[in-house]
Amino acid sequence: MSVFYNEYKSKLLLKEAGLPCGEFALATSRQAAQEAAVRSGFPTVMKIVSEQILHKTEADGIKLNIQGEDEAGACYDKLIENAKRYNPDAVIEGVYVAHMVPNGVEVIVGGLRDVQFGPVIMFGLGGVFVEIFKDVQFRMAPLNKKEALALIQSIQAFPILEGARGQKPVNLDALAELIVSTSKFMAENDYVKEIDLNPIICYDNKIQVIDAVIGID
Amino acid sequence: MSLEHFYYPKSIAIIGASNNPAKAGYQIANNMIRLGFEGEIYFINPKEDIIFGKKAYDSLLDIEGKVDLIEIIIPAKGVLEVFRQAEQRGDVRAAIIMASGFAETGIPENIQMEKDMLEIAHRAGIRVFGPNCVGVMNTENNLDTTFAADIAQRPGGMSVISQSGSIGAAILMFTCDQPVPMGFCKWGHVGNMSDVTTEELLKYYRDDPKTKVIAMYMEGMTDARSFFETAKEVTPQKPMIVLKVGRSEIGSVAAASHTGSLAGADKVFDGAFRQTGVLRADTVEELVDTAKAFSMLDQLPKGNRVAILTEAGGPGVISMDEIGSHKEVRMAKFSNETNARLKEILPPMALISHPDGYVDMTAGADGPQHAEALEAILRDEGVDAVLLLSVPPTFLVPPAIAEAVNSKMPLAKELGKPVFACFLAGNWIKEAHIMMENNGIPTFEMPQRAARALVNMIKHSAYLRDLQIGE
């Protein structure tokens, strides 16, 4: 049975591995949360951090589009309260605070340690593409950049990343770099059993990991 | 140690050869004699004096001449004793074990028996195929250790690795069942892989100068990572086509994460195939069709632009459907000169470049018109390969069309543009298919099968070109 690192811990590790996770902080008091929110710049997003609460939406553990210091304080209190109600035994490590990024194309990158193949990497578009169509592709890790680009191009929904229907194309280069880094991280760290980067938001100039979970043995 | 002693033994001893046609030991002996293995054959069966007109020995130890390869057809319980005798002889280098009943049963004493067998083999320098396998075939020396029926040994470019003895044999039966039998080079079934693995066999074929294309039937892999790492070294040198079936428990162990729940075994295999340039076939037909194309042709298409030249609409559309469902391939776009030339050559009702790359000559086109249209298309710089289709009506004699088409094959070869053909159907076109195959045009039973084999060839050539671009 895997143990999962919480989002904060996962992102710290991934950031160190070179993945674009943006700036984020862990606040353990109302005041610290307010200060972190101001530093991040509004709008801000806040999420509960607990190893016992992996499905944050279910626990009402996410607050989006926070516009000011007062709201940030109130959200902190509310998140702690919701978490305690959802799972009274959960160890709450604090609240994750980051700037809220605008909408973009959502993709998912995953990693898995397979019994036959060892470390493998998965890529697909987020939302219905992964949930309904299961339009994902796998490769053995580690990958070089050329292989990562080929992986991106191999999914059915690739035209969306290229900018279908008048949208700007997403930054494929940055996406390929992220896949390469994730695949190296999988290949180099035997204790890592699985990784979910879901979603990653892609823009024409950059990409950013929005949520991350690392499962270890 | 290489697998040379399995495929090129100077002598083979068959332990359990029999005079009873109901036994594997009879059929194997029969295959070896019938095919005329180019080496010494020794039959061992203490209950017989003569088998197929040859002296039957009581034991391995009674054979005076040298023994390279032993094939053990007797039940599992007698296998260890044979290995002890082989060790005592000191000249045996390879063994094929047909019996099952070893480690795969999970029974401790059977596991121990396999361990003991391998210990002797290791000590005596004997490599092992099996247990639970039918061994090898090699058309170069007429070697066949199997009891497969009706396989003509004809040299060809394809070598086969099969994780099923029966499907492996069926693949060879299909190679015989072609307008011009395509033959094969080597064949191997390693069974439970106590020693020699499919990966080692793959490496052997990679280094075998006679093997041009590798076809494999795959059920599962104990070490998929290592196999595919080897495959990645093979595909730049030789095309590899694999029919992969079955599923494993992968993913179910880690279904807590999103990635885990999406990772069906097949998805990961599929990714590994793409990553290592291995062509994946969905059916036995596709495996054989594709291997045939590679084994017949020395030239790969230089690009991915396909032209379809057909005498009838139906097969044309069927093949276009197949072409259209692979994004690695596209229909060619003819130059204005080619379009004008086709208009000049073909009957007035012919459909030219409608859609792009597609020409329906209609049933009004005669042999010379087939040939001239083919030439015009071959000469177009926007074309990399041609699919030629026909349902010859009564007034078009198939061999006459084949002859006209064949006259353009020197040009096709000079330009390096493969031509694939499918005439429909059955006995009516059999002679035409034979004539075309003898001139370097692979033919197929159905239009979509011709298209699929061509698509696979184009995928392989694209993979090779992509490798050259570098990282």
Image: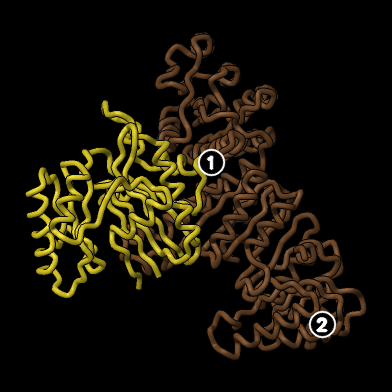
Chain colours: A yellow, B brown
Q: Which residue is mark 1?
A: B456
Q: Quadrant of residue B47?
A: bottom right
The chain to which mark 1 is attached is B
**Mark 2 against mark 1, which lies toward the viewer?**
2
Seen as rendered, the residue at the extreme bottom is: B109
State how far apart marks 2 and 1 are (Cα): 47 Å
- Given residues A181 and B37, the one toward you in this image is A181
Quarter placement of the C terminus of chain B: top right
Q: Which residue is mark 2?
A: B87
Q: Residue at x 41, y 45 (%)?
A: A178
Q: Quadrant of residue B54?
A: bottom right
Percent of width and height locating residue A97: 21, 52
Q: Residue at x 55, y 25 (%)?
A: B396
Seen as rendered, the residue at the extreme right is: B64
Task: Say what secondary structure mark 2 lies in.
Answer: helix
- Given residues B94 and B55, the one toward you in this image is B94
Percent of width and height locating residue B235: 62, 46
**Same chain, labels 2 and 1:** yes
Specify whether B414 is left or right of B89.
left
Quarter placement of the N terminus of chain B: bottom right
Is residue B82 shown above or below A123? Answer: below
Mark 1 burial class by Cα count in 10 Å: few <14, some 14-19, many 20+: many
Q: Residue at x 88, y 84 (%)?
A: B62
Percent of width and height locating residue B305: 51, 27
Amino acid at dot 1: Asn
Q: Is residue B53 visible?
A: no
Dot label at residue B314: none
